[in-house]
Amino acid sequence: PALGLIDYLVIVCSPRVAPLRQALVEAHTVAALVEGAGMSALVLHDGLLFTVNRTMMLRRPRVVVFVGHADVKSVNGQRTLGLVDSTGQLLDMRHETMVEVLASSDRLELLVLNGCCSEDVCTEVSRRFGVATAGWRTLTADVAAKVWSIGLVERLVRDAGPLSRSNV
């Protein structure tokens, strides 16, 4: 959709320093599942912090699916998501800033962080904003992460309707 609110936002971040070869395939498969169920989806390809922040505020998604690295060490030593600047370089960003950007949609019901070791960000978003989250406690292979993400979204759109902690 060109304008207005969206149901699913899929954020792809495959930085030059550590590209994820299947990230775009995963993102577009997720979007196709969502759209096939009659809901709206938008895929952000560039992983730019500015684009993510702006889209969260303007499009106010119900569900955000992040596809990328989530084990990037932030300036304060915590793990955070690997978003990039306009040159494609990973940003050295505070963990708290990422949490606030990801939870900035007042309609957000679920945050899916499909990246290694994303549990810390998931826990912080849930604790601070009461949003249901799903992510990884450990490192994972890209193929396994892709299968998990697609399977999760397939189940969510099949069961469509409001999300709650009990059905995630």
Image: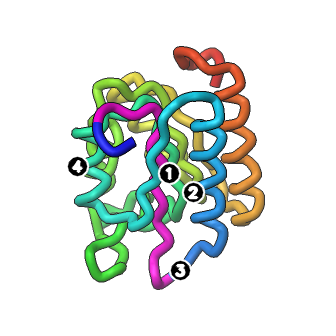
Q: Amino acid at mark 1?
A: Phe
Colour mapping used in the image? rainbow
Reply above or below: 165 against 137: above
Number of the label disc, if any, that sits on residue 158: none
Task: Say which residue appears at 62% left-offset and 20% top-offset.
Answer: 160
Q: Which residue is mark 3?
A: 18
- Residue closest to the eye, 12 or 36: 36
Residue type pointed to by label 4 = Arg
Q: Secondary structure at mark 2?
A: loop
- Residue type at mark 3 is Ala
Of pointers 2 and 3, the one earlier in the residue sequence: 3
Tag 2–tag 3 contact (CB < 8 Å):
no
Identify which amino acid the numbered label 2 is placed on: Gly
- Badge 1 or badge 3: first in the primary sequence: 3
Task: Please say whether residue 126 is visible from this viewpoint.
Answer: no
Q: Residue at x 43, y 29 (%)?
A: 62
Q: Provide the residue designation for mark 4.
A: 54
